[in-house]
């Protein structure tokens, strides 16, 4: 009853005191210096406060404006802590005893600088050591006592910056909520939740960092017993690599890292787990997730700032990858051993699918990885050693119809340049093969993937990789094998052999020049092709390469000493094509080709689109579908020469032309040829992107023998020399369609000729031509002459009429002298009929012009 009365008296006194404070509201400004002195004494740093406001509700205390806790000058001039608003709640029992004791501090959006000095110590170490030496009661002390209690400190939306001396590092923690309290007589606790960030980069998915821990009182900080749990949950792997290295390395996945720290800073035992969910490269998507995980144990010592007794294990299906050893700070000594035991090749393939594009979906692999690697550094000397192999390795893809192995793939780790190349050591030839890099790298091979495939040998290091392929191989198998391994290769049916000396190199860099994009493998070297047959999509026949020397340079592909057959013509010459232009269709092929003879009709027929096969359920469709001509996807330019060009019955010799093809649109310029004893110069265009294809051309003719023209037409109906110019446009794949659709003009001028089938008088021989000139128009399958002039010993005439492609004649030969008539010429070119017009002399056929 006495105890109950005592509590009632205390409550009454507190109520009276609270009422007096509420009514009188004593000013808090006179307490400012006292509060500054108290805080400064507690932290051992100079303190400044902008203003102090007394607060009675909901709990007695103070509101502090612009609290600044200055740092030790040895760590820099910037304040250690800055907070615009601080709420300090007073412990009521201390107020009743006549002293100020803070029970709780709430900091709103404070900024805390953690600084590492030149001596390796942090600016918070003295504060922690000072707190350990100060005889404070626990934050939640159960009974009243003279000792002040350690306040419960809480911060919301804080920012924690990290500095190295006066230099502020880009790393920081934002949106940080943390709490600090004294848990018991000798134990303090801390809790933190924050988002890591970098001030020099735009990061938006770095996850959440959580820290829970306790530490105990000790004379020196490195002897402080502590127990902490850390968790970094949800950072996106690309953002994490950008946070740590400054660049997004191009990897994706959700990361979870957890660690438990126990012991003292002098010997801190660490147990950690790391996992990456749905690991993949940024430009690879898959429905099957891949989880990478590892568990590590070890301890860290602040004495030498090194990790010791490290043991990491990563189970891989039925196998295990283990890493163990010691390593110190950056640039220090270390020794690590990595081992792989019974790791299935299928698991390696699952990883490869997420770091290498274009691997076939049905690619399967068998085999087992075993190996041991050691990495040691002592006195600035690095030594690497180790070896292993993938036994009974075999890979197969049904879609690519490819099978590699079975064979064993050996590898070894070294830090020396072995100088080994794909064609021998220390070569000085134009293509010296693959040289091993300087510095640490993993060498593998030699490895033969199977019958008909070249031998491979290569290396891998932290920057990239290189593979050498050498030996004679079958073209079809090596193309399928390349596609199976994700190396871009022609999607075509090819057969034949090649002697290879190739190097495949690539980089692990995920970002280049700030732009995303893993650099694909680049193939360089030489290949000697023999008896290669390539089926071209949409062409009327294959391309048969008897022999060729191919050179793959970083910027272009060259083909020299080419001997090939296509479109019933034998070709020789050279080709060149730039690399790095995206797709083969975007690259322009440059060529210089020669042929002994070209048949124009066979060439057009070879390039003509073919009917594509239809599935059985589409047999009732009214029209068949055609595959587009291979010309539609080709860009090429160069020069073509041939000794003989045959266009139906017309023969042109010593033909040369500049040819440009751009996705089905053809331009033939500077076309020159010896034609009918004279010369032809012209330019032609063809558009194969429309159906039927369209043509147009123009040119000049000089020194043409009309007798040779008649001989090509199998009828000696004319003789003499001629010149002229032409323009013509037509459509169609066939010659008959071309001439039937042709529209154009022919400006002609013939001299010193004869028309053996015609005579204008009984006592005259064949009609002689001193000059024949005019303009002919080609239309509707007929050649129309109007106002042509014929000058002969028999007189001067105006010539008009038509000549059809069936060699039918309908002409009028009128004398130009007034008052005289002329002749009508009908029939055919081989058997013309001549009749006089009214008032003219009789004209007749020469007997020798009659059909035999």
Image: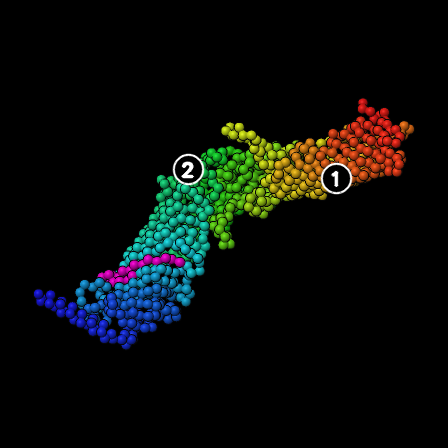
Circle 2 — which element?
strand
- The residue located at (44%, 58%) in the rendering is 201
Q: Is residue 247 above or below residue 656?
A: below
Name the image quarter holding residue 723. top right
Of 515 and 479, the residue lying toward us: 515
Bounds of the magenta span?
179-197
| Residue 773 drawn at (x, y percent) | 81, 39
Circle 1 — which element?
strand
Judge the density around disc 1: few (<14), some (14-19), many (≥20) Cα neighbours within 10 Å. many
Name the dominant secondary structure of the magenta segment.
Answer: strand
**Residue that lies at the very extreme toward the right in this rendered image:** 763
Of 704 and 565, the residue lying toward us: 704
Of 804 and 329, the residue lying toward us: 804
Judge the density around disc 2: few (<14), some (14-19), many (≥20) Cα neighbours within 10 Å. many
Residue to which mark 1 is pinned: 745
Among the two numbered marks 1 and 2 on one chain, the one whose residue lies closer to the N terminus: 2
Is residue 193 visible from the viewing direction of this image? Answer: yes
**Residue that lies at the very extreme toward the left in this rendered image:** 1
User: Quick check: is 246 in the magenta stretch?
Assistant: no
- The residue located at (55%, 39%) in the rendering is 490
- The residue located at (71%, 34%) in the rendering is 780
Of 557 and 444, the residue lying toward us: 557
Residue to which mark 2 is pinned: 367
Name the image quarter holding residue 501. top right
């Amino acid at each position: 009853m006495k105890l109950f009365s005592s509590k009632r008296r205390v409550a009454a006194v507190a109520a009276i005191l609270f009422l007096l404070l509420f009514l009188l509201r004593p000013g808090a400004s006179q307490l400012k210096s006292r509060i500054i002195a108290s805080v400064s004494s507690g932290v051992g740093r100079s303190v400044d406060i902008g203003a102090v406001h007394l607060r009675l509700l909901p709990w007695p205390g103070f509101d502090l404006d612009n609290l600044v806790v200055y740092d030790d000058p040895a760590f820099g001039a910037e304040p250690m802590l800055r907070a615009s608003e601080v709420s300090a709640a007073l412990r009521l029992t201390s107020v009743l005893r006549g002293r100020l004791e803070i029970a709780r501090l709430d900091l709103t959006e404070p900024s805390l600088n953690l600084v590492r000095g030149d001596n390796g110590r942090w600016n918070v170490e003295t504060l922690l050591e000072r707190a350990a030496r100060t005889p404070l009661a626990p934050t939640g002390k159960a009974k009243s006592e003279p000792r002040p209690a350690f306040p419960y400190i809480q911060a919301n939306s804080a920012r924690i910056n990290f500095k190295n001396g006066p230099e502020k590092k880009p790393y920081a923690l934002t949106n940080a909520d943390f709490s600090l309290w004294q848990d018991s007589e000798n134990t303090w606790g801390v809790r933190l939740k924050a988002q890591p960030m970098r001030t020099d980069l735009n990061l938006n998915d770095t996850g959440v960092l959580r820290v829970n821990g306790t530490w105990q009182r000790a004379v020196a900080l490195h002897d402080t017993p502590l127990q902490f749990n850390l968790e970094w949950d949800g950072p996106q792997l690309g953002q994490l690599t950008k946070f740590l290295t400054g660049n997004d390395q191009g990897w994706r996945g959700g990361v979870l890292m957890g660690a438990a720290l126990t012991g003292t800073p002098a010997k801190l035992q660490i147990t950690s787990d790391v996992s990456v969910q749905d690991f993949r490269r940024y430009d690879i998507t898959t429905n099957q997730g891949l989880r990478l995980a590892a568990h590590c144990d070890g301890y860290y010592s602040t004495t030498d700032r090194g990790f010791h007794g490290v043991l990491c294990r990563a189970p891989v299906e039925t196998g295990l990858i283990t890493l163990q050893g010691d390593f110190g700070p950056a640039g220090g000594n270390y020794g690590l051993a990595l081992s792989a035991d019974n790791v299935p090749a299928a698991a390696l393939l699952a990883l490869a699918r997420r770091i290498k594009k274009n691997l076939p979906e049905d690619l399967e692999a068998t085999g087992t990885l075993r190996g041991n690697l050691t990495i040691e550094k002592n006195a600035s000397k690095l030594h690497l050693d180790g070896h292993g192999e993938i036994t009974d390795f075999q890979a197969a893809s049904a879609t690519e119809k490819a099978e590699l192995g079975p064979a064993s793939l050996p590898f070894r780790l070294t830090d020396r340049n072995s100088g080994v190349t794909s064609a021998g050591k220390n070569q000085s030839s134009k293509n010296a093969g693959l040289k091993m890099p300087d510095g640490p790298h993993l060498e593998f091979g030699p490895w033969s993937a199977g019958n008909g495939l070249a031998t491979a040998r290569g290396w891998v290091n932290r920057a990239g990789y290189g593979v050498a392929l050498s030996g004679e191989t079958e073209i079809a198998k090596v193309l399928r094998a390349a596609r199976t391994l994700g190396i871009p290769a022609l999607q075509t049916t090819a057969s034949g052999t090649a002697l290879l000396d190739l190097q495949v190199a690539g980089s692990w860099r995920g970002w280049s020049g700030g732009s995303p994009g893993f650099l694909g493998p680049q193939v360089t070297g030489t290949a000697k092709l023999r008896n290669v047959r390539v089926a071209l999509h949409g062409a009327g026949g294959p391309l048969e390469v008897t022999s060729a020397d191919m050179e793959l340079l970083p910027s272009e592909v060259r083909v020299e000493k080419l001997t090939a057959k296509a479109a019933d013509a034998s070709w020789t010459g050279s080709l060149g094509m730039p690399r790095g232009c995206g797709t083969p269709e975007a690259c322009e092929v440059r060529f210089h080709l020669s042929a002994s003879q070209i048949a124009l009709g066979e060439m057009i027929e070879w390039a003509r689109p073919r009917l594509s096969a239809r599935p059985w359920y589409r047999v009732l469709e009214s029209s068949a579908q055609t595959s587009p001509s291979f010309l539609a996807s080709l860009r090429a330019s160069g020069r073509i020469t041939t000794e003989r060009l045959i266009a139906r019955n017309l023969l042109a010799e010593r033909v040369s032309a500049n040819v440009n093809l751009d996705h089905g649109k053809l331009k033939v310029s500077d076309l020159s040829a010896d034609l009918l004893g004279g010369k032809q110069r012209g330019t032609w265009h063809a558009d194969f992107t429309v159906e039927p294809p369209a043509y147009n051309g123009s040119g000049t003719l000089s020194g043409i023998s009309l007798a040779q023209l008649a001989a090509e037409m199998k009828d000696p109906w004319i003789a003499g020399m001629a010149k002229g110019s032409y323009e013509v446009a037509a459509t169609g794949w066939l010659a008959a369609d071309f001439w039937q659709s042709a529209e154009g003009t022919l400006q002609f001028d013939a001299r010193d000729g004869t028309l053996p089938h015609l005579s204008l008088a009984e006592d005259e021989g064949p009609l002689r031509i001193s000059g024949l000139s005019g303009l002919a128009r080609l239309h509707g399958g007929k050649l129309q002459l109007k106002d042509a002039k014929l000058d002969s010993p028999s007189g001067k005439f105006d010539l008009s009429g038509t000549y059809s492609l069936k060699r039918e004649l309908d002409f009028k030969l009128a004398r130009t002298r007034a008052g005289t008539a002329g002749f009508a010429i009908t029939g055919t070119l081989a058997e013309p009929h001549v009749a006089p017009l009214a008032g003219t002399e009789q004209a007749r056929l020469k007997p020798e012009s009659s059909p035999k």
